Image: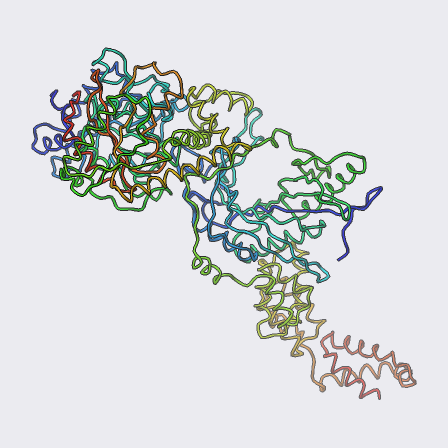
């Protein structure tokens, strides 16, 4: 891949990006309490005594969340730390009832790993994972409910998050986008995070710096709380350009936390007060260190599903799917599940063509997800069968497909009802061919005198005569016999 | 009736069984004793009606022969245990209006066993103090004050718990001990108190001071009564991750065995601190003699890091406290100094809501955890804590229990100790066992030259409360301590 550079007035600059992905653990209950994590409940409906930090309340680890974090670590080829510690991160905020967030600081549950990201041209790049730690989410402050008061909703308070910290291996907005997509894809395959960015289940903080080729790392700025891939990419571009401009104007970059304003397309510093935190991390004395055995970790390892990289390879090697289609199909579990159902016992290449062109096109046009597809994978498979065995032509198949998409009917019903079955018997086709020849005797002469490109005209006429149902291969063959 | 209040739990149980009196009569007697001692300021919240109601329920169980182990036994609760529907203040203005809608595990265990709640007794604010004087509601007065006609401190932080038992105004009280908060007041008030092994009693529902040290325990007149109370208060609680998943032995069975043959008692030489009064040294030596008489081997031992225990404690406990008390911010419950801006709300609520000693410890704790100071203070203190634990581990290879004085002096006058450091010195003998999480008990063992109670402390191995109780009941038997009531 071509090196991404920011072209300043004077120099070219490389960008260096590290990402912190905050992924909400897919779990029925919170990290240290039994309250529900349901999204969209009424404010303060899912709040236990522990979540509200009532006096004398104590956290108890939700083992399921621990398993989810281990699974995620294994899915990102990372080292699972058999000894990890929960620390308190101390700061005051109205939506942080304890006055501290329980997190992991010096001893996180997951250590270093790698993830391979993919580009549309089939190229790949390895991005290092620094660590994954578990932490509690805070509540939510609502400032728009009353002219002079703020309200607090503690439903999110205590929900488990995994903070996935990358190494600063990312060097373009596209790589950042591909990285987030890949992380999201892997977590969704694992079932450890639903990856829903609109609902805030996946959020990102981005560390950006710029430097000239050969220079040491520049000063970085952190841009907080980005909740879409697009915003992450825009924020990186915007921030990198700002830094280049600052440097070229002779200013120094100040290490700080900034916010991205997508409307104005700019980043600006957060209030300096919010930067001045000394979090006073120390081990939470209410919780004992988490000690895992090899056996425990291995049991989880055995339960891991196939992940996108394996699936992509499988699609290319065993199903004849192109690299590009394979990476598209493998990105989402729902799509690969659909593909494997649809291609069962069939030509994978043909199924992948119909899936990635016709079905994706129609789904996009109607703003539908694959889970909501009116055409079931089984029906798409049957449609492909009808093409393969010559029951219908590829062109007719598009009409059948459109009808299936419209009515959810199975392809054989559509073909029967509309009488679209391909005409593949010579007895039926010869009269049509003879009719075309007798109606176009002048063209037959021209053809016989060497104007061979007229052959296509005859084929077209026969197809027209058959309302498109004629088997094109057979038409070709019969026409040649008749004309020569 | 007056003789009721001078009895022990075991004696009252016997009397209830023989129908010498009813649970209601017992409860009335202790209510009267509490009311006639109003000037001693035992209670933050006195729950007379609740006590009478609970006594009636107890009596009906006794009548139907379905009585439980503590049916008919009126007890007081330190105002640090959350009690459902009853004000729970931690003796602080900031929780001055706080009524929990939940019950702490330890108090629930007591009610499930039939105990009767007289009320919530005073303590130092958030259990931070050794004199009861940091309470927002004023200090409890030591009932022994009448001996020298001066207002004496009951000690702290569980001063109200020790005082109310000492005065014969409750048969037992719950306490909590972080660095000596059960043992020092028990010694000052001439009663018995045990801090069990860390993890023996659930911390769930007890307002936290320093989570890695806090442990609940009973204060009673006698060793037997402490054992009985501890039987009920102990037990694994899945709601407390630091609670020990261990069966509770019958602690009562450990008491009353007056043969100490083959028992090895360690006397740590580092506890002979300079300036310690001769009466404390004499009492300690008398203690050796008593145990020797019963067949125990007395062995001098060394706990070399003892002198670092107090400074270590006063780094770790405030560090944890500074974080534990962050939740009292005026946002969710308790006192609020209403302000338009969040930062002002915090500042004013906490400035008004906390007393000086609590603020001092929050500041110390915040300091020792701060960037740049963490390694020099908090991390170093954790290392020293490990060395102190190792000291005990080593000594406990050779001995079964350790005998020390509980405090370096008898109870002092209210208002006489103004300097925080000299106040902290009260904990010098009790803090090491707290840092190591070991069971430790104070037994009233004699009187000072001016007639005030002194206690001896027995420290045991982890989860070996039984040997601690066994030795304590031997000291009790020989000391023949002249209880006030």
Please identify the residue farthest to the top as the structure is shown. Answer: B149
Q: Quadrant of residue B137?
A: top left
Q: Quadrant of residue A402?
A: bottom right
**Residue plotted at (57% across, 60% down):** A333
On the rendered image, what quadrant is the C terminus of chain A found in? bottom right
Give x and y (percent) for residue A477: 77, 85
Q: Which of B475 and B170 is in front in this view?
A: B475
Give x and y (percent) for residue B471: 20, 36
Q: How many labels does the image show?
A: 0
Q: Which of A147 and A469 is in front in this view?
A: A147
Residue A346 horizontal side relative to residue A174, left or right? left
Give x and y (percent) for residue B11: 12, 30
Above or below A39: residue B7: above
Q: Quadrant of residue B10?
A: top left
Give x and y (percent) for residue A96: 50, 34
Look at the image and tell me whether residue A301 can be seen: yes
On the rendered image, what quadrant is the N terminus of chain A found in? bottom right
**Residue plotted at (30% across, 15% down):** B413
Residue A88 horizontal side relative to residue B272, left or right? right
Q: Nearer the viewer, residue A434 or B475?
A: B475
Above or below A322: residue A391: below
Colouring chosen for the image of the structure: rainbow
Look at the image and tell me whether residue B82 can be seen: no
**Residue plotted at (44% across, 51% down):** A64
Q: Which of B229 and B49 is in front in this view?
A: B229
Residue B367 horizontal side relative to residue B107, left or right? right
Above or below A456: residue A313: above
């Amino acid at each position: 891949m071509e090196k991404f550079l920011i072209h300043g007035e004077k120099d070219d600059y490389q960008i260096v990006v590290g990402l912190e992905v905050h992924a909400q653990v897919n779990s029925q209950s919170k990290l240290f309490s039994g309250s529900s994590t349901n999204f969209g409940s009424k404010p303060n409906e899912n709040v236990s005594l522990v979540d509200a930090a009532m006096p004398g309340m104590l956290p108890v680890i939700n083992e399921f969340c621990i398993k989810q974090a281990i699974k995620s670590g294994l899915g990102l080829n990372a080292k699972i730390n058999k000894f990890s510690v929960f620390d308190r991160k101390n700061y005051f905020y109205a939506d942080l009832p304890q006055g501290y967030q329980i997190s992991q600081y010096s001893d996180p549950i997951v250590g270093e790993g790698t993830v391979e990201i993919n580009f549309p041209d089939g190229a790949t790049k390895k991005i290092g994972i620094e660590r994954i730690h578990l932490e509690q989410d805070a509540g939510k402050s609502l400032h728009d409910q009353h002219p002079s008061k703020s309200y607090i909703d503690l439903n999110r308070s205590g929900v488990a998050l995994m903070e996935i910290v990358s190494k600063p291996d990312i060097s373009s907005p596209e790589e950042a986008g591909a990285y987030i997509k890949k992380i999201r894809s892997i977590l969704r395959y694992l079932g450890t995070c639903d990856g829903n960015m609109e609902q805030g289940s996946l959020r990102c903080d981005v560390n950006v710096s710029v430097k000239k080729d050969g220079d040491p790392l520049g000063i970085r700025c952190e841009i907080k709380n980005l909740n879409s891939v697009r915003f992450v990419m825009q924020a990186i571009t915007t921030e990198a350009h700002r830094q280049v401009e600052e440097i070229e104007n002779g200013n120094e970059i100040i290490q700080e936390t900034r916010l991205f304003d997508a409307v104005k397309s700019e980043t600006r510093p957060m209030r300096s007060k919010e930067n001045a935190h000394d979090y006073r991390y120390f081990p939470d004395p209410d919780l004992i260190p988490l000690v895992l055995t090899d056996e425990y970790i291995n049991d989880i390892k055995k339960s891991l599903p196939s992940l996108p990289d394996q699936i992509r390879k499988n699609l290319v090697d065993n199903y004849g799917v192109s690299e590009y289609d394979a990476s598209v199909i493998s990105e989402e579990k729902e799509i690969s599940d659909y593909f494997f159902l649809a291609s069962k016992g069939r030509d994978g290449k043909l199924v992948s063509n119909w899936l990635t062109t016709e079905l994706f096109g129609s789904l996009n046009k109607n703003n539908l997800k694959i889970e909501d597809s009116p055409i079931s994978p089984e029906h798409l498979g049957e449609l492909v069968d009808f093409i393969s065995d010559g029951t219908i032509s590829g062109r007719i198949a598009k009409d059948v497909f459109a009808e299936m998409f419209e009515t959810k009917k199975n392809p054989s019903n559509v073909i029967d009802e509309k009488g679209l079955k391909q005409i593949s018997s010579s007895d039926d086709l010869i009269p049509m061919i003879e009719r075309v020849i007798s109606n176009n005797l002048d063209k037959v002469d021209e053809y016989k005198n060497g104007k061979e490109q007229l052959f296509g005209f005859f084929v077209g006429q026969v197809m027209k005569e058959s309302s498109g149902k004629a088997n094109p291969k057979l038409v070709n063959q019969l026409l040649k016999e008749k004309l020569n | 009736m007056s003789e009721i209040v001078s009895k022990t739990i075991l004696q009252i149980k016997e009397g209830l069984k023989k129908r010498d009196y009813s649970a209601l009569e017992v409860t009335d007697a202790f209510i009267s004793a509490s009311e006639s001692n109003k000037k001693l300021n035992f209670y933050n919240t006195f729950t007379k009606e609740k006590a009478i109601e609970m006594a009636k329920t107890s009596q009906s169980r006794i009548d139907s022969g379905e009585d439980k182990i503590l049916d008919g036994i009126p007890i007081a609760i330190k105002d640090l245990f959350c009690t459902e529907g009853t004000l729970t203040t931690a003796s602080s203005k900031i929780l001055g209006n706080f009524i929990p809608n939940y019950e702490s595990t330890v108090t629930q265990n007591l009610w499930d066993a039939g105990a009767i709640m007289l009320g919530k007794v005073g303590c130092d604010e958030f259990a931070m103090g050794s004199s009861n004087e940091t309470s927002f509601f004023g200090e409890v007065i030591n009932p022994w004050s009448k001996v020298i006609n001066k207002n004496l401190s009951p000690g702290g932080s569980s001063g109200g718990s020790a005082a109310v038992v000492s005065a014969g105004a409750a048969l037992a009280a719950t306490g909590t001990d972080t660095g000596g908060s059960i043992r020092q007041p028990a010694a000052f008030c001439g009663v018995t108190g045990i801090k069990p092994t860390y993890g023996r009693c659930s911390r769930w529902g007890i307002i936290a001071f320093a989570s890695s040290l806090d442990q609940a325990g009973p204060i009673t007149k006698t060793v037997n009564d402490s054992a009985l109370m501890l039987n009920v208060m102990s037990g694994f609680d899945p709601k407390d991750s630091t609670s020990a998943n261990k069966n509770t032995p019958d602690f009562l069975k450990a008491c009353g065995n007056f043969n100490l043959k083959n028992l090895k008692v360690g006397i740590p030489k580092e506890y002979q601190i300079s300036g310690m009064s001769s009466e404390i040294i004499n009492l300690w030596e008398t203690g050796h003699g008593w145990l020797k008489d019963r067949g125990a081997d007395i062995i001098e031992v060394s706990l070399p890091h003892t002198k670092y225990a107090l400074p270590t404690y006063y780094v770790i406990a405030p560090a944890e406290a500074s974080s534990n008390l962050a939740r009292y911010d005026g946002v969710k419950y308790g006192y609020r100094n209403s302000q338009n801006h969040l930062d002002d709300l915090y500042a004013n609520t906490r400035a008004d809501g906390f007393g000086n000693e609590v603020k001092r410890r929050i500041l110390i704790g915040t300091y020792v955890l701060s960037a740049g100071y963490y390694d020099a203070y908090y991390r170093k203190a954790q290392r020293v804590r490990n060395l102190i634990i190792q000291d005990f581990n080593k000594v406990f290879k050779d001995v079964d229990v350790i005998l020390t004085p509980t405090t370096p002096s008898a109870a002092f006058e209210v208002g006489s100790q103004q300097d925080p450091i000299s106040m902290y010195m009260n904990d010098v003998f009790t803090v090491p066992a707290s840092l190591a999480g070991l069971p430790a008990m104070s037994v009233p063992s004699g009187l000072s030259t001016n007639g005030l109670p002194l206690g001896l402390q027995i420290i045991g191995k982890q989860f070996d409360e039984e040997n601690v109780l066994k030795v304590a009941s031997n000291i009790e038997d020989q000391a023949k301590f002249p209880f006030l009531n």
